[in-house]
Image: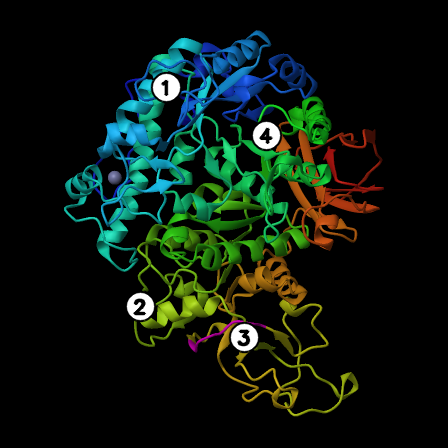
Amino acid sequence: MDRRNFIKTTSAAATFTMANDLVSLPEYNSGQSQANTGETPWYRRVTRWGQTNITEKDPLHYDIGWWRRYWKETAVQGIIVNAGGIVAYYPSAIPLHMQAEYLEGRDLFGDICKAAHQDGLAVFARMDSNRAHEEFYKAHPDWFAIDSGGNPYKAGDLFITCINSPYYNEHIPSILTEIATLYKPEGFTDNSWSGLGRDSICYCGNCRKSFRDRTGLEIPMSADWDNRAYREWIRWNYNRRLEIWDANNRTTIKAGGRFCIWSGMNSGSLIWQSESFRDYREICRRAEIIMLDSQARSDAGGFQQNSDTGKLIHGVLGWDKLVPESMAMYQAGKPTFRMSSKPSAEARMWMLEGIAGGIQPWWHFVGASHEDRRFYKTPGPVFLWHKVNEDYLINRKPVATVGVVWSQLNADFYGRDEGELMVELPWRGITQALIRARIPYIPVHADDIDREAAGLKLLILPDLGVMTGNQTEAVRRFVKNGGGLIATGKSSLYNEWGDRRPDYGLQDLFGTHFIHTDNKSADSSFRKKASATYHTYLRLSPELRKNTDGPAGVNEPDVNGTRHPVFAGFDHTDIISFGGLLDQLKTDETAEVLMTFVPQFPIYPPETAWMREPKTTIPGLIINNVPGCGNIAFMPADLDRQLAKSNLPDHGNMITNLVRWASKENIPLIVECPGLLDCNIYTKPNNLIIHIVNLTSSGTWRQPVDEYIPVGPVRIKVRLPDEVKGMTLQLLVSRQTIPYTINQGWAEFTINSVTDHEVVVI
Ligand SMILES: [Zn+2]
């Protein structure tokens, strides 16, 4: 029996063991598993959601009849309805649970909930806890977060409640109980359940006492990642959020029955999860469903960020569970206009990329009536297509030979206050290089390497600075079993607290050793330097310059010879632009240095732009030959971060070449066609599913996209699983069956044209 299938019981108890340990998982009662009842709970069945995020003015004119028709038109099976928290949308008997300003006694939540239930829809009661009005603050000043000066934290006119106070232990549970008892919603979600973020330390009496009891320390006066108290404070905060998660579930299940779960809300950004003390892996181990609040793309991350997020969450949640995502139909992102339509091409592409990564669509409007009515037309086509084809879009397993490794510990203790720079950029560079090359990948949590290893041929550590001993051991096992490895930047150089080790944790695999310079100041300066772009280069070895290729020059080649396959396509250059800085390292005899660092020299004025030190022995890329192991590349040069920053094709192509070499060309998909395509493969018991999303339009300029550029013909070769015998090949978007040939276990076929996306079912 899969533990994930067990249902939490009211007797489940979360307990603290040690200050440094995460809160232990709630107990599960195998006697109450859904498998035993034969009943599929709503959170496994409802795959399309809708949300009209109610404003305080809406109760005056909320047109439930219109919205009921709209639910039907868009084929949603569940809705998210504002219930309580900061303000109540029903007549609440809980003291200080203030009614929405224009509610005027109406039971709006109750009316909508009833209508949805009559229409056979599931209802997620949406809470928004963590802030309150002044009246509440005056009644319970000790329930609110306090800054180091003794003043309450505020957001506008509202006061911010403290996560360690009776507001979370008593007030919110009493509201959850009241709503569950009165209205029987299927479950609860909460917009800002995790309280104050990392940038605001609370010094209220509750926090001070709790922290002292758990750790014997005082709450730190400032953020200092080298201070033990601050590090313990980070862990203590994570633990508290897990306690809240478990406690709220106990409350709602007790009041609303065993399927009445509470499922907070989580972000699509790992960095934001870290800044909010939400441990994604631990939350996913507890959650039956992840409610994802990730409404639009950033220019930097692109639409592909959404499929990446879906795969990352499913990797720790399980692919049998659902991850609906709030998708803004209004102009969300940069800039935000709550009341006007997002160009439908932009909104649609975000939805499609989510679906490609295993996310379920959830339309989201702010307010219940709008003067810009164009966006009501946006979700319908995607939702209706989803309804027809959902069998192929959920409950499937990804097929990929490349795993990109992540951990929240790394986001915290390597990322520190520069999570975007230190953690997100290398991730984005690697994943973007893979997408450019149409190489399917899955995100792999660093604690799950053993579990995922069987299907993978290559692990990539994108500047994964912080690694625990268990994690480096798992990588070592993978490589000793013949798996390939690419590690970049300062991977494995830091322990779980972010303290530098004497040498790389994986020094034996890298064949490379860190040379001690001085101390902490070197570490902090390298963080600062990572944000700048320097006029530096990498020299490829051996050099190939021939007289026929260009004029004789100042930097004469040392050697002419045959190049390593990782330099395919670079025949006419001996250097590539870099942008970062590198330090001297020591390499073993088994290691081959394929790229060396060229230090910076002036750009301006042009007369000064010549290499002062054209050749060094500082390694930028090392291949280590370890008998019995897979192919290993260690690239101290952070080409991943540079690609994310500067988008230079050389950086992407070099990463792709490394991936092909280190995986021994073991990539299950070949897609030939110009354009930027995000390609993902999944399996179900009788099917192979390929989802291709055409991102070419978004690649041409900044957001928003307002028209699509079709690409094609798209020639595809996909490796078939062994058991495939006879087959048909169906396209779910253009609704046709197409011919194919089979050649040595690979299916080959051509799709004439892809406008926004296509799903191939074999
Ligand atoms: Zn506090």
- Give whichever of discs 4 and 2 has the lower sequence position: 4
The stretch in magenta equals 578-585
* Mark closer to the observer (3, 4): 4
Q: Which residue carries the number 3 mark? A: 534
Work out whether residue 445 can be spotted. no
Image-quarter location of ligand 1: top left
> In the image, which disc is placed on residue 176?
1
Q: Residue placed at 63% from the left, 74% from the top?
A: 576
Determine the CA span between mark 1 and mark 3: 54 Å
Circle 1 sits in a helix, a strand or a loop, which is it? helix
Question: Alpha-carbon neighbours of circle 4 within 10 Å: few (<14), some, or many (≥20)?
Answer: many
| Of the image marks 1 and 4, the number of the one nearer the N terminus | 1
Amino acid type for the residue under numbered disc 3 = Tyr
Mark 3 Cα within 10 Å, few/some/many (few <14, many 20+)?
A: some
Left or right side of 517 for 125: right
Pointer 1 or 3: first along the chain: 1
Tell me if label 2 and label 1 are in contact, CB under 8 Å: no
**Mark 3 CB lies closer than 8 A to ligand 1:** no
Tell me how far mark 2 sits from mark 3, CA to CA. Answer: 28 Å
Lower sequence index among marks 3 and 4: 4
Residue 334 tag number? none
